[in-house]
Image (spheres, helix red, strand yellow):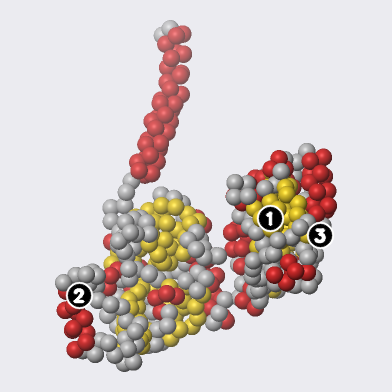
Amino acid sequence: MTSQALAFRSRQPQMFRAFWLTVLAVALLLGQALSARALPDSFADLADQISPSVVNITTSTTVTGRDQPSPMVPEGSPFEDFFREFQDRNGGNDESRPRRSQALGSGFVISEDGYIVTNNHVIENADEIEIEFFNGERLDATLVGTDPNTDIALLKVEAEEPLPFVTFGDSDTARVGDWAVAMGNPLGQGFSVSAGIVSARNRALSGTYDDYIQTDAAINRGNSGGPLFNTNGEVIGVNTAILSPNGGSIGIGFSMASNVVSKVVTQLQEFGETRRGWLGVRIQDVTDDMAEAMGLQQAKGAMVTDVPDGPAKDAGMEAGDVITSFDNVDVDDTRGLVRQVGNTSVGKTVRVTVWRDGETETLRVTLGRRENAEAVPAAQTQDMPSEPEVLDLMGMSISELTPDLRQQLDLDEDATGLVVTNVDEMANAFEKGIRAGDLITDAGQQKVTGLTDLEDRITEARDAGRKSILLLVRQNGDPRFVALPLDAD
């Protein structure tokens, strides 16, 4: 045998090993691709698992004839007179006679001893709450507590045997495109399951603590308060609202994220009410022009517009500070800060990093309780008399604060600043929301009490190479920062 043949034979084991390793690698890649593309054959097993823990909720409320809705007959319809006569014959115009009104919703059991989660709007003002379980059993429920801010309510039933229940999952791990399964009582049709995907995350509707998961799983009236599940059978949201022009599902539904709900439920169980942390500041988002005016590299954080008596003031926080970090978590905007503060325990001392006068400073703040905080009343703007000493700049007419103006604007005796007497509707100031009657208290993050103060701040900003100047403006008592371009005058 030649030396070449011997060399080939000696390499055969290595060649075969390399070949099979290549085949195995290709097979694994194909398997992963097929697994990623695979769709579930059925949601039947999941439905069997979660159905016993989902409930229908029927509420009864006493209403008067005045509170009752009119029949679903279009105005001007030939049937309108018929229904009006029918109501008259049956005492429909007797507004003093009380009646019972019923509403339907959904919920889910979270403990074997009978705690049930639903929406606040499902049971709001209800005199009686009845729970229907998947097996047909019906039990009366008592209200443990509610949180209108997140539209969550906690109920309790007394059952003879332990109840099947579901647990909360981590909504922060839900990804756009993940499967989502909704269950509830749509349009009073009883237990119904629908499936879709997570369409979007971190949606905000109108609440301070909003953190909604958007889904295209069918959600209709009556689904309110029902659970949104992941494929592990964990609750990742509470179905709360839909976006629809006709009242039916068009594939845009919103579920309050479970990481918000679980914190609320824990407090309702323990206290019967929520106890959210309170920092004690008024804040607004930082815009690009505001960031430029302050020397911030990015338009991030929460600008402090006012510091009334409270935890932040006690810790030394000032109006004009930009909160960049709270409890060692970066602050991107006001919405994120409000949620984080609210989720922090009352009485906890946290580190708050602020941007002040071009430098960072760390404060230690002991949080109060938001529910106990009192709102600061707003001053009412009234018509102002004309004033002879007026400075025209940046599209505004500005006057010093006189006793007459103080009285007209209903300002406190210790209020200081400059009064905006007129704003050019074509000016940048008008576009930014500044109006006659507003009070300018700070310019360039320094107090201004006279017209020369404002002129000096503008000169300083120009000398520093700034393109805009930051003004702290109070409108009807509410403070906010506005950055105006320096070339506007």
How far across and how far down the image is residue 255, in percent?
Answer: 43, 63
Depth check, front residue: 356 or 71: 71
Q: Is residue 350 above or below residue 87?
A: above
Check disc 1 and give the amino acid type: Phe
Tell me which residue sits at (32%, 49%) in the image.
Answer: 39
Check disc 3 and give the amino acid type: Thr
Tell me which residue sits at (28%, 53%) in the image.
Answer: 41
User: Sequence-wise, which precedes: disc 2 or disc 3?
Assistant: 2
Label 3 or label 1, whichever lies nearer to me, is 3
User: Sequence-wise, which precedes: disc 2 or disc 1?
Assistant: 2
Q: CA distance from mark 2 to mark 1?
A: 54 Å
Residue 463 in the figure: left or right of residue 410:
right
Which quarter of the picture shows residue 463? top right
Residue count near mark 2 (Cα–Cα under 10 Å), binned few <14, some 14–19, many ≥20: some
Residue 176 in the figure: left or right of residue 88:
right
Q: CA distance from mark 3 to mark 1?
A: 17 Å
Q: Which residue is mark 1?
A: 481
User: Sequence-wise, which precedes: disc 3 or disc 1?
Assistant: 3
Check disc 2 and give the amino acid type: Glu
Which quarter of the picture shows residue 381? bottom right
Residue count near mark 3 (Cα–Cα under 10 Å), binned few <14, some 14–19, many ≥20: some
How far across and how far down the image is residue 353, in percent?
Answer: 74, 57
Element class at badge 3:
loop
Q: Which residue is mark 3?
A: 449
Element class at badge 1:
strand
Depth check, front residue: 268 or 302: 302
Q: Residue furthest top?
A: 2
Which quarter of the picture shows residue 61? bottom left
Q: Which residue is mark 2?
A: 80
Element class at badge 2:
helix
Depth check, front residue: 236 or 273: 273
- What is the quadrant of the N terminus in the image? top left
